[in-house]
Amino acid sequence: MELWTSARRSKVIDVRGLLGVLVLFYTVGVESRKSVKWDYFEYAALSCRAHSASVSDFGGVGDGTTANTKAFQAAIDHLSQFSSEGGSILYVPPGRWLTGSFNLTSYFTLYLDKDAVLLASQDESEYPLIEPLPSYGRGRDADGARYSSLIFGNNLTDVIITGANGTIDGQGELWWTKFRAGELNYTRPYLIEIMFSTNIQISNLTLINSPSWNVHPVYCSNVVVQGLTILAPVRSPNTDGINPDSCTNTRIEDCYIVSGDDCVAVKSGWDEYGISFGMPTKQLVVRRLTCISPTSAVIALGSEMSGGIEDVRAEDITAIDSESGVRIKTAVGRGGYVKDIYVRGMTLKTMKWVFWMTGNYGSHPDNNYDPNAIPVIQNINYRDVVAENVTMAAKLEGIAGDPFTGICISNVTIGLAQNSKKLQWNCTDVAGITSEVNPKPCALLPDQGPGKIRGCNFPEDSLPVENMEVQTCYFFRKHHW
């Protein structure tokens, strides 16, 4: 077995034997005169760490009522000194840890025990105000500044947020109530937001009741999101699951999401701000995703897509009681593009629409958008789809004079609900082809017959993010007795 001594695994050792003779440089505090017993656990991570601490070492109290914001920040600030010495891990023990927003550091892992719950403070003063995203020009809920996310990072390298399926509870009900009542002066905090960073892992956690979006990597590269369970009431406002935004090389896999909005929403900036910033989302893999979202999409491309979205590969997608499958939403004024989208292997049960594209989504940040900024939608591919209890097969609405082109749909079987629409395919301003699709598609997507097209082929090459592999790391704990 291997012991982490730095970010690289190189030393082979018997961990069980090591426990009998282990001498570690414990990062915080002075050893007690009491006898010490050591144990350890394994976890999967892109990088292992050489230094460690627990939030309780910095005065943290996991009683559900004590504020721990200062304890978390003090622990992370202390551990930041080890960024060039093998990095560090902050352990969150069993307990209910009330906290406001705190900032992460580089070469760092935040690890939640299986019985640890981070409770997001409902005190607005615990969330510092930060500038709106440059590609958005304003907050999503209100003009101007926005609240920092519960867990926040900016300009970082090699950051891991993981656990043994520990829980982050956003306690969002208060925020939802204020939002619905129009009582917020600033945009709600997200649970996790990482900006301008590279080599990011977010995995093996349960996220519940976020005030707004759950996971928001923005302006990032090399991002792996794995094994998340994300839960929110299906009528909660804007509780998107995972929103990669102007990111390159992202992998989302093995996640289960119940949401009041899109389970995954792919974005890249809003109207003139996104066009000016000019950072696309590209090289995105989404696989083995299960979604329940009665009022939104399983995967949405847009509507904020003004920096462009390209080379998205989604496969092995399961949806239950959701509004639509992989949806494209955009509008005049967005500019940008959505192109080279590949989807295969969707299993859909109880859907309003299987396919939905719209070019008249609206929703602009202000009145300064360019009415001549027309988005380009092209090379959109779906194959191997089975759906049942569907109200309507497709609603495909391009933009007059600038149709969505290169749509390819093949090998699709759609079972209709008892209350299904008489018109199953409603198509305007789109162009493409289909093969072996039932019920029969619209005339703008003519059936080429079986074997007449190449099946809307899914790319055979691998993206770089698919080669990012986790390794087995170890965390040693001591117990006084």
Image (spheres, grey):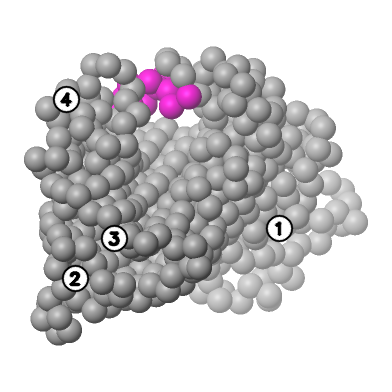
Q: Is residue 315 above or below residue 95?
A: below
Q: For marks 3 and 2, give the one nearer the viewer.
A: 3
Rendering coords of residue 57 (x, y %): 74, 39
* Classed neighbour count for the residue bearing mark 4: other residues with Cα under 10 Å, few (<14), some (14–19), many (≥20): few
Q: In the image as oriented, which residue stretches furthest toward the bottom?
A: 451
Whether residue 34 appears in this view of the structure is: yes
Q: CA distance from mark 1 to mark 3?
A: 47 Å
Give the structural element (helix, strand or loop) at label 2. strand
Check residue 434 in the rendering and tell me which mark sits there, or answer none: 2
Whether residue 348 appears in this view of the structure is: no
| Residue numbers of the magenta segment | 131-141
Asked whether disc 2 touches disc 4, contact meaning CB atoms under 8 Å apart, the reply is no
Q: Which residue is mark 4?
A: 371
Asked whether disc 1 touches disc 3, contact meaning CB atoms under 8 Å apart, the reply is no
Rendering coords of residue 72 (x, y %): 65, 34
Q: Residue at x 74, y 39 (%)?
A: 97
Q: Residue at x 12, y 76 (%)?
A: 448
Q: For marks 1 and 4, give the one nearer the viewer.
A: 4
Q: Which residue is mark 3?
A: 425
Q: Is residue 400 above or below residue 275?
A: below
Mark 2 or 1 closer to N-term? 1
Q: For marks 2 and 1, give the one nearer the viewer.
A: 2
